[in-house]
């Protein structure tokens, strides 16, 4: 991956980590906590259609490049301004100059 230039990062995404809470009955309720808003380059790779948890849907693989961060975990996700949710599946990156490359899935 080439160096990241500010002009190439044209998407604002919010990094979120899981933050389960409890409801009134003490049951775990999945929730997400915002960590940071980052500029990114989002590249579509491929898509697959099928039945996901009994619902027809599509999973699209994406490569998302952001500035270097050393705190990202594969349990986190990215959310776009339009509400698209990218689940982080892999974290790569060679060095600080080349940023982080995240392998993500988008379910629709």
Image: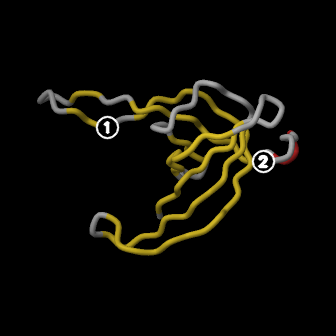
Measured from the top left, where is residue 58 in percent x and y? Answer: 47, 69
Q: Is residue 70 left or right of residue 2?
A: left
Judging from the image, the colouring scheme is: secondary structure
Q: CA distance from mark 1 to mark 2?
A: 30 Å
Q: Is residue 37 above or below residue 2?
A: above
Q: Residue at x 51, y 41 (%)?
A: 77
> Tag 1: Cα neighbours inside 10 Å, few (<14), some, or many (≥20)?
few
According to the picture, the residue beneath numbered tag 2 turns out to be 10
Task: Residue 24: name its quadrant.
Answer: top left
Measured from the top left, where is residue 106 in percent x and y? Answer: 52, 57
In this rendered view, identify the residue nearer to me: 82 or 90: 90
> Reading the chain from its start, which is encountered first: label 1 or label 2?
2
> Tag 2: Cα neighbours inside 10 Å, few (<14), some, or many (≥20)?
few
Measured from the top left, where is residue 94 in percent x and y? Answer: 75, 36
According to the picture, the residue beneath numbered tag 1 turns out to be 30
Secondary structure found at label 1: loop
Q: Residue at x 36, y 35 (%)?
A: 31
């Amino acid at each position: 991956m080439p160096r990241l230039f500010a002009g190439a990062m044209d998407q604002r995404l919010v990094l979120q980590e899981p933050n389960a809470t409890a409801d009134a009955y003490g049951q775990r309720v999945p929730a997400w906590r915002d960590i940071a808003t980052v500029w990114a380059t989002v590249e579509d790779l491929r898509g697959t259609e099928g039945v996901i948890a009994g619902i027809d849907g599509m999973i699209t693989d994406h490569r998302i490049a952001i500035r270097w961060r050393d705190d990202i975990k594969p349990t986190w996700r990215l959310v776009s301004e339009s509400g698209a949710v990218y689940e982080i599946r892999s974290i790569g990156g060679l060095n600080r100059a080349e940023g982080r490359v995240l392998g993500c899935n988008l379910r629709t």
